[in-house]
């Protein structure tokens, strides 16, 4: 960032000097500005090549750092997502192991001792939690 500010200040300085010289030779208003812009552009191309290269190098370095951080963050996100998918795939298998012989379960996730048919309390209020139906 510092090299960019230095380069910009040098360009503005060259423009100011070129404008002063053109103004002293009698050019006024828009003609003076256009001539100063042209002269300062040509002068900066020759005189400020090292500063321009430094700005370019620092810009490339910043972009590479951003790309590396982005790739690292994407890799972390992929790892978390794969872990989440793996856990989701393992959960049904673990749930199947905890079921009873007939596979019926009550509202608490415990295996039911009966044939899996709803009880009278479940028939009356199927949305009620199992703990409320047991009492």
Image: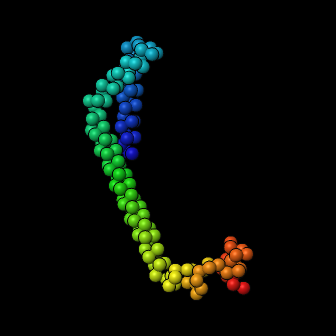
x and y percentages locating residue 131 in the rendered image: 67, 82
**Image quarter hosting the C terminus:** bottom right
Say which quarter of the image contains residue 14. Answer: top left
Kindly tell me whether residue 27 is visible in this rendering. yes
Q: Nearer the viewer, residue 100 or 2?
A: 100
Instruction: Answer left or right for 120 relative to 38.
Output: right
Instruction: Answer left or right for 114 relative to 95.
Output: right
x and y percentages locating residue 64 in the rendered image: 32, 50
Image point 43% across, 70% down: which residue? 89
Image point 31% across, 45% down: which residue? 60
Image point 36% across, 60% down: which residue? 75
Image point 55% across, 84% down: which residue? 111
x and y percentages locating residue 46 in the rendered image: 26, 30
x and y percentages locating residue 127 in the rendered image: 68, 72
**Image quarter hosting the N terminus:** top left
Instruction: Answer left or right for 65 relative to 130.
Output: left
Instruction: Answer left or right for 97 relative to 68.
Output: right
């Amino acid at each position: 960032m510092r090299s960019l500010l230095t380069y910009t200040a040098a360009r503005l300085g060259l423009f100011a000097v070129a404008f002063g010289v053109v103004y002293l030779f009698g050019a006024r208003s828009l003609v003076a500005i256009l001539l100063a812009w042209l002269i300062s552009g040509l002068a900066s191309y020759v005189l400020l090549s090292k500063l321009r290269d430094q700005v370019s190098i620092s810009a490339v370095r910043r972009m590479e750092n951003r790309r590396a951080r982005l790739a690292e963050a994407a890799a972390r996100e992929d790892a978390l997502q794969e872990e989440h998918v793996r856990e989701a795939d393992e959960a049904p298998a673990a749930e199947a192991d905890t079921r009873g012989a007939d596979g019926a379960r009550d509202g608490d996730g415990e295996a039911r001792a009966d044939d899996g048919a709803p009880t009278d309390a479940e028939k009356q209020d199927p949305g009620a939690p199992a703990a409320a139906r047991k009492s």
